[in-house]
């Protein structure tokens, strides 16, 4: 039997994205990124990050519970902390919405103080292990289907955290089908063009927000060192590369992405547009202009 060798790539045709639990824990701890929104991508991802791969046993307030693969049990108070909601009923309403979308099912235990939830289709996307063992929640990874992520993003107005997760799950690396992916993990919204270039208007529609808000959030994520955001002259579009993607996904050193190298790969002329072109593109907002950055270290 030939020895298995891991391929360092994230390809467009693969229907799932590997999400590390520690990455989600880090996002949950980053209070500077807002979570309030109607998309539900962040909330669903958090629930998935706690779900079991194998049967385990848990005690809460002296009561023992059996937790099967794809399930987890927590107090309503814990749930509100994970979701960052002010009131526990708000956290429960989020569960209601995810249940209406047929993504989870849940029930109350211990007179409403404890919630037991189950990720639907968990076995379809994640390997279920038969043996019993404690399931750690801050190590390892799970698989998120890209189609579910796309459906959640389109379901409502995205929060800053939803947008960051969407960028992460849309990343492609070292795939010949996507231009620019050979030099770094680039965001590609799988529109069939093979080009990672995206306009503000496209991203605004995708996330259910305005172009001005799109520019503000992308600038904020770039300033926080989550992404490298590059805008190009005229109406060419913008490209987004992810920071710390390679070290998180593949445990290898991250790479430096240079704007001039990206422009060369995408065959973009970096020369400034003439005055006539500038007047034609008068719809560009102040927010869009200020988000232009040069390549920075991943």
Image (cartoon, helix red, strand yellow):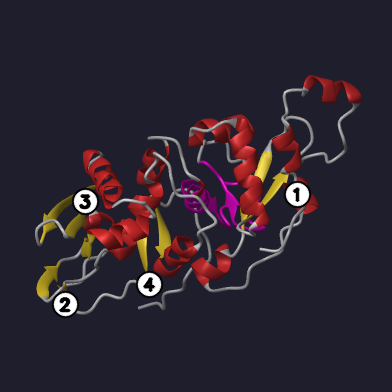
Q: Residue at x 59, y 36 (%)?
A: 213
Q: Nearer the viewer, residue 226 or 224?
A: 224
Identity of the residue furthest to the front in this view = 87
- Within 10 Å of disc 1 (Cα), the crowding (few <14, some 14-19, many 20+) is some
Q: Position of residue 75 (x, y in %)?
A: 22, 63
Label pair 1/4, CB-CB below 8 angstroms: no
Query: Relative to residue 196, is residue 17 drawn left or right?
Result: left
Mark 2 or mark 3: name the one nearer the start of the chain: 3
Mark 4 or mark 2: name the one nearer the start of the chain: 2
- Within 10 Å of disc 4 (Cα), the crowding (few <14, some 14-19, many 20+) is some
Q: Nearer the viewer, mark 2 or mark 3?
A: 3
Label pair 3/1, CB-CB below 8 angstroms: no
Question: In the image, is residue 175 part of the stretch drawn in magenta?
Answer: yes
Q: Nearer the viewer, residue 287 or 268?
A: 287
Q: Which mark is residue 120?
A: 3
Q: Which mark is residue 153?
A: none
Q: Give the residue at mark 1.
A: 293
């Amino acid at each position: 039997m030939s020895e298995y060798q891991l391929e360092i790539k994230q390809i467009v045709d693969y229907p799932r994205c590997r999400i590390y639990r520690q990455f989600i824990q880090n996002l949950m701890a980053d209070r500077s990124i807002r979570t309030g929104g109607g998309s539900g991508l962040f909330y669903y991802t958090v629930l998935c990050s706690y779900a079991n791969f194998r049967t385990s046993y848990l005690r809460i307030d002296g009561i023992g519970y059996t937790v099967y693969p794809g399930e987890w049990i927590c107090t309503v108070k814990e749930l509100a902390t994970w979701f960052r909601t002010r009131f526990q009923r708000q956290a429960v309403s989020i569960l209601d919405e995810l249940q209406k979308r047929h993504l989870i099912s849940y029930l109350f235990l211990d007179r409403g103080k404890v919630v037991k939830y189950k990720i639907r289709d968990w076995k379809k996307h994640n390997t279920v292990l038969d043996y019993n063992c404690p399931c750690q929640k801050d190590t390892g990874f799970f698989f998120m289907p890209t189609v579910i992520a796309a459906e959640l993003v389109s379901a409502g107005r995205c929060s800053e955290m939803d947008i960051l997760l969407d960028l992460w799950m849309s990343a492609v690396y070292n795939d010949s089908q996507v231009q620019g992916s050979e030099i770094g993990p680039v965001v590609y919204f799988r529109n069939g063009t093979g080009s990672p270039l995206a306009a503000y208007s496209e991203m605004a529609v995708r996330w259910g927000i305005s172009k001005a808000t799109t520019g503000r959030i992308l600038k904020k994520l770039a300033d926080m060192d989550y992404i490298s955001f590059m805008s190009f002259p005229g109406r060419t579009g913008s490209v987004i590369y992810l920071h710390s993607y390679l070290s998180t996904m593949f445990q290898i050193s991250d790479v430096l992405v240079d704007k001039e190298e990206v422009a060369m790969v995408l065959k973009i002329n970096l020369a400034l547009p003439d005055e006539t072109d500038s007047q034609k593109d008068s719809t560009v907002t102040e927010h869009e202009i200020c988000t232009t950055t040069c390549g920075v270290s991943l």
